[in-house]
Amino acid sequence: MRGDGARVARFMTVELGKYGIWRHASALTPDVAREIEALGFGAVWIGGSPPGDLRLAESLLDATDHIAVATGIVNMWTTPAEEVAPSYHRIEKAHPGRFLLGVGIGHPEAVKEYRSPLQTIVAYLDALDAARVPKDGRVLAALGPKVLKIAAARTAGAHPYLTTPEHTRWARELVGPGVLLAPEQKVVLETDPEKARAIGRPPVDRPYLHLRNYVANLERLGWTDEDFADGGSDALIDALAVHGDAAALAAGLNAHLEAGADHVCAQVLTADNADPLPAMREIAKALGLSPVRR
Protein backbone atom coordinates (compact mmCIF):
# COMPACT_ATOMS: atom_id res chain seq x y z
CA MET A 1 0.00 0.00 0.00
CA ARG A 2 1.09 3.58 -0.59
CA GLY A 3 1.83 5.83 2.32
CA ASP A 4 -0.82 8.31 1.12
CA GLY A 5 -2.74 7.60 -2.04
CA ALA A 6 -5.48 10.20 -2.01
CA ARG A 7 -6.61 11.46 -5.37
CA VAL A 8 -6.12 15.17 -5.03
CA ALA A 9 -8.32 16.94 -7.54
CA ARG A 10 -11.62 16.48 -9.24
CA PHE A 11 -10.28 15.60 -12.69
CA MET A 12 -7.10 13.80 -11.67
CA THR A 13 -6.45 10.23 -12.75
CA VAL A 14 -2.91 10.18 -11.33
CA GLU A 15 -2.69 9.66 -7.57
CA LEU A 16 0.03 11.90 -6.15
CA GLY A 17 -0.72 11.63 -2.45
CA LYS A 18 -0.10 14.63 -0.22
CA TYR A 19 3.70 14.69 -0.34
CA GLY A 20 6.27 14.34 -3.09
CA ILE A 21 9.96 14.92 -3.67
CA TRP A 22 11.24 17.40 -6.27
CA ARG A 23 14.74 16.71 -7.61
CA HIS A 24 16.69 18.05 -10.56
CA ALA A 25 16.88 15.53 -13.38
CA SER A 26 20.65 15.33 -12.99
CA ALA A 27 20.22 14.09 -9.39
CA LEU A 28 17.57 11.45 -10.08
CA THR A 29 18.26 7.78 -10.75
CA PRO A 30 16.13 4.66 -10.56
CA ASP A 31 17.78 3.81 -7.24
CA VAL A 32 16.86 7.20 -5.78
CA ALA A 33 13.27 6.80 -6.99
CA ARG A 34 13.05 3.40 -5.30
CA GLU A 35 14.28 4.94 -2.04
CA ILE A 36 11.73 7.76 -2.26
CA GLU A 37 8.95 5.28 -2.93
CA ALA A 38 10.03 3.09 -0.02
CA LEU A 39 9.81 6.08 2.34
CA GLY A 40 6.13 6.49 1.50
CA PHE A 41 6.18 9.64 -0.65
CA GLY A 42 3.50 9.72 -3.31
CA ALA A 43 5.39 11.28 -6.22
CA VAL A 44 8.78 12.09 -7.69
CA TRP A 45 8.97 15.38 -9.58
CA ILE A 46 11.66 15.67 -12.27
CA GLY A 47 13.00 19.21 -12.34
CA GLY A 48 15.36 21.02 -14.65
CA SER A 49 13.49 20.95 -17.99
CA PRO A 50 13.88 17.26 -18.87
CA PRO A 51 14.00 16.51 -22.62
CA GLY A 52 10.93 15.57 -24.58
CA ASP A 53 11.82 11.92 -24.94
CA LEU A 54 10.93 11.52 -21.23
CA ARG A 55 13.33 8.57 -20.96
CA LEU A 56 14.25 9.49 -17.39
CA ALA A 57 10.61 9.44 -16.32
CA GLU A 58 10.20 6.08 -17.99
CA SER A 59 13.25 4.66 -16.22
CA LEU A 60 11.97 5.84 -12.82
CA LEU A 61 8.59 4.25 -13.46
CA ASP A 62 10.19 1.03 -14.69
CA ALA A 63 12.22 0.81 -11.47
CA THR A 64 9.32 1.40 -9.05
CA ASP A 65 6.03 -0.26 -8.23
CA HIS A 66 3.43 2.43 -7.64
CA ILE A 67 4.87 5.91 -7.03
CA ALA A 68 3.75 8.61 -9.46
CA VAL A 69 6.31 10.44 -11.59
CA ALA A 70 5.75 14.01 -12.79
CA THR A 71 7.80 16.46 -14.81
CA GLY A 72 8.39 19.81 -13.19
CA ILE A 73 8.63 20.95 -15.97
CA VAL A 74 9.02 20.21 -19.67
CA ASN A 75 9.90 23.63 -21.10
CA MET A 76 7.53 24.91 -23.79
CA TRP A 77 10.16 27.21 -25.30
CA THR A 78 12.59 24.38 -26.06
CA THR A 79 10.52 21.18 -26.39
CA PRO A 80 7.70 21.13 -28.95
CA ALA A 81 4.40 19.59 -27.93
CA GLU A 82 4.63 17.36 -30.99
CA GLU A 83 7.81 15.88 -29.50
CA VAL A 84 6.59 15.28 -25.96
CA ALA A 85 3.10 13.98 -26.81
CA PRO A 86 4.26 10.62 -28.26
CA SER A 87 6.47 10.16 -25.21
CA TYR A 88 3.48 10.77 -22.95
CA HIS A 89 1.43 8.14 -24.77
CA ARG A 90 4.31 5.64 -24.68
CA ILE A 91 4.66 6.03 -20.92
CA GLU A 92 0.91 6.04 -20.24
CA LYS A 93 0.57 2.77 -22.15
CA ALA A 94 3.37 1.13 -20.16
CA HIS A 95 2.45 2.65 -16.77
CA PRO A 96 -1.21 3.70 -16.86
CA GLY A 97 -2.20 6.29 -14.29
CA ARG A 98 1.30 6.85 -12.91
CA PHE A 99 2.70 9.67 -15.05
CA LEU A 100 1.77 13.36 -14.90
CA LEU A 101 3.09 15.64 -17.63
CA GLY A 102 4.08 19.00 -16.16
CA VAL A 103 4.72 21.69 -18.76
CA GLY A 104 5.51 25.36 -18.47
CA ILE A 105 6.86 28.50 -20.03
CA GLY A 106 10.09 28.64 -18.05
CA HIS A 107 11.57 32.13 -17.92
CA PRO A 108 11.98 34.54 -20.84
CA GLU A 109 15.60 35.40 -19.98
CA ALA A 110 16.58 31.96 -21.30
CA VAL A 111 14.96 32.53 -24.70
CA LYS A 112 16.83 34.33 -27.46
CA GLU A 113 13.73 34.93 -29.57
CA TYR A 114 10.99 36.44 -27.43
CA ARG A 115 7.44 35.23 -27.97
CA SER A 116 4.28 36.08 -26.07
CA PRO A 117 4.18 33.78 -23.03
CA LEU A 118 0.39 33.54 -22.88
CA GLN A 119 0.05 32.89 -26.61
CA THR A 120 2.79 30.28 -26.40
CA ILE A 121 1.07 28.51 -23.49
CA VAL A 122 -2.31 28.43 -25.23
CA ALA A 123 -0.83 27.23 -28.52
CA TYR A 124 1.14 24.52 -26.72
CA LEU A 125 -1.94 23.25 -24.89
CA ASP A 126 -3.86 23.32 -28.17
CA ALA A 127 -1.15 21.12 -29.68
CA LEU A 128 -1.36 18.71 -26.73
CA ASP A 129 -5.13 18.57 -27.23
CA ALA A 130 -4.63 17.78 -30.90
CA ALA A 131 -2.20 15.01 -29.92
CA ARG A 132 -4.79 13.59 -27.48
CA VAL A 133 -2.80 14.25 -24.32
CA PRO A 134 -5.69 14.43 -21.84
CA LYS A 135 -6.42 17.43 -19.68
CA ASP A 136 -6.28 15.30 -16.53
CA GLY A 137 -2.86 13.94 -17.47
CA ARG A 138 -1.09 17.28 -17.50
CA VAL A 139 -0.40 20.24 -15.23
CA LEU A 140 0.90 23.72 -15.90
CA ALA A 141 3.62 25.68 -14.10
CA ALA A 142 1.81 28.80 -12.94
CA LEU A 143 2.46 31.75 -10.66
CA GLY A 144 0.42 34.76 -11.77
CA PRO A 145 -3.35 35.07 -12.11
CA LYS A 146 -3.59 34.74 -15.89
CA VAL A 147 -1.58 31.53 -16.06
CA LEU A 148 -3.26 30.09 -12.97
CA LYS A 149 -6.62 30.58 -14.68
CA ILE A 150 -5.32 28.86 -17.82
CA ALA A 151 -4.04 25.99 -15.67
CA ALA A 152 -7.48 25.62 -14.08
CA ALA A 153 -9.29 25.70 -17.43
CA ARG A 154 -6.95 23.68 -19.62
CA THR A 155 -5.16 21.20 -17.34
CA ALA A 156 -5.65 19.25 -14.12
CA GLY A 157 -4.12 22.18 -12.25
CA ALA A 158 -1.03 24.18 -11.34
CA HIS A 159 2.51 23.43 -10.20
CA PRO A 160 3.79 26.70 -8.65
CA TYR A 161 7.54 26.89 -8.01
CA LEU A 162 9.41 29.04 -5.46
CA THR A 163 6.34 30.06 -3.54
CA THR A 164 5.04 30.38 0.01
CA PRO A 165 1.85 29.24 1.75
CA GLU A 166 0.54 32.79 1.26
CA HIS A 167 0.77 32.27 -2.50
CA THR A 168 -0.92 28.88 -2.16
CA ARG A 169 -3.83 30.45 -0.26
CA TRP A 170 -4.21 33.21 -2.86
CA ALA A 171 -3.95 30.71 -5.74
CA ARG A 172 -6.62 28.47 -4.22
CA GLU A 173 -8.99 31.40 -3.88
CA LEU A 174 -8.32 32.28 -7.52
CA VAL A 175 -8.78 28.83 -9.10
CA GLY A 176 -11.46 27.52 -6.77
CA PRO A 177 -12.02 23.94 -5.63
CA GLY A 178 -11.37 20.80 -7.62
CA VAL A 179 -8.23 22.14 -9.32
CA LEU A 180 -4.88 20.59 -8.45
CA LEU A 181 -2.44 22.85 -6.60
CA ALA A 182 0.96 21.21 -6.19
CA PRO A 183 3.53 23.79 -5.03
CA GLU A 184 7.24 23.16 -4.59
CA GLN A 185 8.84 24.01 -1.23
CA LYS A 186 12.58 24.05 -0.55
CA VAL A 187 13.62 22.65 2.85
CA VAL A 188 16.91 22.49 4.73
CA LEU A 189 17.36 20.04 7.61
CA GLU A 190 19.56 22.30 9.74
CA THR A 191 18.70 23.96 13.05
CA ASP A 192 21.46 26.58 12.94
CA PRO A 193 19.95 29.54 11.04
CA GLU A 194 23.23 30.80 9.60
CA LYS A 195 24.26 27.37 8.36
CA ALA A 196 20.79 26.78 6.96
CA ARG A 197 20.78 30.09 5.08
CA ALA A 198 24.24 29.33 3.69
CA ILE A 199 22.66 26.22 2.14
CA GLY A 200 19.35 27.76 1.10
CA ARG A 201 20.45 31.17 -0.19
CA PRO A 202 22.53 30.21 -3.29
CA PRO A 203 19.84 28.13 -5.08
CA VAL A 204 17.25 30.82 -4.34
CA ASP A 205 19.41 33.78 -5.37
CA ARG A 206 20.74 32.23 -8.57
CA PRO A 207 18.88 32.33 -10.74
CA TYR A 208 15.46 33.10 -9.27
CA LEU A 209 16.02 36.48 -7.64
CA HIS A 210 17.29 37.66 -11.02
CA LEU A 211 14.34 36.42 -13.10
CA ARG A 212 11.50 38.86 -13.55
CA ASN A 213 8.61 36.38 -13.43
CA TYR A 214 9.69 35.03 -10.03
CA VAL A 215 10.48 38.47 -8.64
CA ALA A 216 7.12 39.80 -9.85
CA ASN A 217 5.36 36.93 -8.08
CA LEU A 218 7.19 37.61 -4.83
CA GLU A 219 6.35 41.31 -5.13
CA ARG A 220 2.67 40.35 -5.35
CA LEU A 221 3.14 38.66 -1.98
CA GLY A 222 4.57 41.82 -0.42
CA TRP A 223 8.32 41.28 -0.72
CA THR A 224 10.35 44.33 -1.77
CA ASP A 225 13.58 45.28 -3.52
CA GLU A 226 15.34 45.19 -0.15
CA ASP A 227 14.41 41.51 0.17
CA PHE A 228 15.84 40.71 -3.27
CA ALA A 229 19.16 42.50 -2.76
CA ASP A 230 22.45 40.89 -1.75
CA GLY A 231 21.30 37.30 -2.24
CA GLY A 232 17.97 37.74 -0.49
CA SER A 233 17.00 38.94 2.98
CA ASP A 234 17.08 36.45 5.83
CA ALA A 235 13.29 36.61 6.05
CA LEU A 236 12.86 35.82 2.35
CA ILE A 237 15.34 32.95 2.41
CA ASP A 238 13.68 31.53 5.52
CA ALA A 239 10.32 31.59 3.73
CA LEU A 240 11.52 30.07 0.46
CA ALA A 241 13.91 27.52 2.00
CA VAL A 242 12.32 26.47 5.30
CA HIS A 243 14.90 25.26 7.81
CA GLY A 244 14.97 23.55 11.19
CA ASP A 245 14.55 20.05 12.53
CA ALA A 246 12.39 17.47 10.79
CA ALA A 247 9.29 18.59 12.68
CA ALA A 248 9.80 22.18 11.53
CA LEU A 249 10.20 21.06 7.92
CA ALA A 250 7.05 18.94 8.15
CA ALA A 251 5.22 21.98 9.50
CA GLY A 252 6.50 24.06 6.58
CA LEU A 253 5.21 21.52 4.08
CA ASN A 254 1.89 21.13 5.87
CA ALA A 255 1.43 24.91 5.84
CA HIS A 256 0.83 24.64 2.08
CA LEU A 257 -1.78 21.94 2.58
CA GLU A 258 -3.48 24.03 5.25
CA ALA A 259 -3.48 26.97 2.81
CA GLY A 260 -5.27 24.95 0.15
CA ALA A 261 -2.70 22.82 -1.67
CA ASP A 262 -3.62 19.24 -2.56
CA HIS A 263 -0.02 18.07 -2.80
CA VAL A 264 3.32 19.64 -1.87
CA CYS A 265 6.67 18.58 -3.27
CA ALA A 266 9.73 19.05 -1.09
CA GLN A 267 13.04 20.03 -2.64
CA VAL A 268 15.58 18.89 -0.05
CA LEU A 269 18.69 21.09 -0.09
CA THR A 270 21.94 19.88 1.45
CA ALA A 271 25.42 21.29 2.01
CA ASP A 272 27.99 20.53 -0.68
CA ASN A 273 25.50 18.37 -2.59
CA ALA A 274 25.50 15.78 0.16
CA ASP A 275 23.23 12.74 -0.08
CA PRO A 276 19.67 14.00 0.61
CA LEU A 277 18.26 10.59 1.52
CA PRO A 278 19.05 10.82 5.26
CA ALA A 279 17.11 14.10 5.42
CA MET A 280 14.28 12.60 3.38
CA ARG A 281 14.04 9.74 5.84
CA GLU A 282 13.71 12.14 8.77
CA ILE A 283 11.15 14.26 6.94
CA ALA A 284 9.10 11.20 5.98
CA LYS A 285 9.04 10.09 9.60
CA ALA A 286 8.00 13.55 10.79
CA LEU A 287 5.22 13.61 8.19
CA GLY A 288 3.96 10.27 9.48
CA LEU A 289 4.48 8.48 6.18
CA SER A 290 4.41 4.70 6.29
CA PRO A 291 7.49 2.98 4.83
CA VAL A 292 6.69 0.70 1.93
CA ARG A 293 8.21 -2.75 1.85
CA ARG A 294 9.19 -4.06 -1.55
Image (cartoon, rainbow, N blue to C red):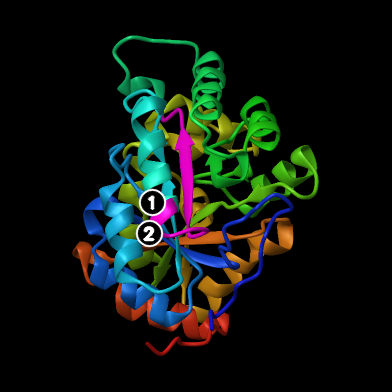
User: Is the residue marked by circle 1 packed among few (<14), some (14-19), or many (20+) residues within 10 Å?
Assistant: many
State the residue position of label 1: 91
263 relative to 42, above or below: above
Point 33% across, 67% down: residue? 195
Q: Position of residue 61 (x, y in %)?
A: 35, 63
Reading the chain from its start, which is encountered first: label 2 or label 1?
1
> Is there any visible trace of residue 190 in the rendered image?
no
Point 51% across, 69% down: residue? 42
**Looking at the image, which is closer to me, 242 or 47?**
47
Amino acid tagged 2: Arg
Instruction: Check residue 245 in the rendering and tell me which mark sits there, or answer none.
Output: none
Q: Does the magenta-highlighted stretch encompass residue 242?
A: no
Q: Label 1: state its secondary structure.
A: helix
107 relative to 261, above or below: above
Location of residue 60 (image quadrant): bottom left
Q: Is residue 211 left or right of residue 238?
A: left
Q: Is residue 198 left or right of residue 266?
A: left
In the image, the segment drawn in magenta is 93-106
**Looking at the image, which is closer to me, 177 or 111?**
177
State the residue position of label 2: 197
Q: Position of residue 127 (x, y in %)?
A: 49, 23
> Is there any visible trace of residue 232 in the rendered image?
yes
**Looking at the image, which is closer to me, 291 or 188?**
291
Q: Are marks 2 and 1 in contact (CB under 8 Å)?
A: no
